[in-house]
Image (cartoon, rainbow, N blue to C red):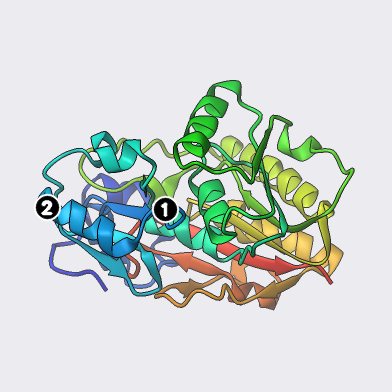
Amino acid sequence: MVTGEAPDRGGRYGRVFARYEGLIPDFPGFLAAVARPSPVHLRVNTLRAEVGGVAAALAAQGVVTRPEPWCPFLLRVEGEPPRALGATLLHALGLIYLQSASSAVAALALGARPGEAVLDLCAAPGSKTTLLAQAMGDRGAVVANEPNPRRLQSLTANLDRLGLTAAVVTGYPGQNFPLGRKFDRVLVDAPCSGEGTWRGPRARPQPPSAGLRRHLARQQGALLRRGYELLAPGGTLVYSTCTYAPEENEGVVGPLVAETGARLEPLGVELPAEPGLTRWEGEEFPPELALARRLYPHCFDSEGFFVARLARP
């Protein structure tokens, strides 16, 4: 657990996150953690470089790193980097990718393997897509779908920079992605209210209205259902968001589980996290949702995330 600073009881984070006081364990510790900036993580592109070599090259530039125990090719930068890592030669050559630890968890939970057909339904800017292709050894097919033309530019640029050849880019609205073929694995990292990214003094939280939450939940539900329809029998789907809102997390996954018989599974990534909720404000969710994981900054020092892994019988 991250400790060492007074909680932000009366500050803006206390006001922004007040609705979660009875939901998040050790709420004062949570407020203290979100008041600090999230640590910098980078992923070594093991298709092009070795972790030790990258770590040594960074150390020569004054950047001290340590690998995360649950993912040896994800390096945590100790302290403030002396220079912008996105402006280094290592980054330009596609040897590293700046990615939050929580984002990496969502992609690793999918368990993609070489030779499989994998769909990333909401792919830009490519953080999880490129990790999926890397985990597959760049063998198989990763369909990176992104409907926003402006975000497509960053997606294709990252795929090119990392030298990935297994990825195919499409631009369909996710909820209308064609049903012509089935995939072994599907990632639905849905657009959300982004509460988990609000960390540190420079963040500018914009709490959503109740109407916006309902709109997001409808959109997320449509994306999740289409992702499940595209999943082959016996396949695996991961649903993730970077928000704490139960309406956008358990409230989206629960109805799909109840209506389709989708099976919740453990993430397969061992890290400090809280279980998914089985009830919220009088609403009951399927008990299996306890297998989902909620990543809180005071327990897992990165962005706040929700990750659920489902299997199609």
Measuring 33% from the left and 35% from the top, which residue is drawn there? 92
x, y (%) of residue 135?
54, 60
x, y (%) of residue 11?
21, 48
Residue bearing the label numbered 2? 60
Q: Secondary structure at mark 2?
A: helix
State the separation of the CA atoms marked 2 and 1.
Answer: 19 Å
Q: Is residue 157 above or below residue 78?
A: above
Depth check: give the residue in front, 126 or 176.
126
Depth check: give the residue in front, 112 or 262.
112
Measuring 40% from the left and 73% from the top, which residue is drawn there? 70
Q: Is residue 258 left or right of residue 281?
A: right
Disc 2, disc 1: CB below 8 Å?
Answer: no
Q: Quadrant of the image for the C terminus?
A: bottom right
Residue bearing the label numbered 1? 45
Depth check: give the residue in front, 201 or 209.
201
Q: Is residue 300 visible?
A: yes
Measuring 67% from the left and 45% from the top, which residue is drawn there? 220
Measuring 24% from the left and 41% from the top, which residue is drawn there? 85
Mark 2 crowd level (few <14, some 14–19, many ≥20, 10 Å Cα): few
Kind of residue sitting beneath label 1: Asn
Mark 1 crowd level (few <14, some 14–19, many ≥20, 10 Å Cα): many
Q: Quadrant of the image for the N terminus?
A: bottom left
Q: Is residue 31 visible?
A: no
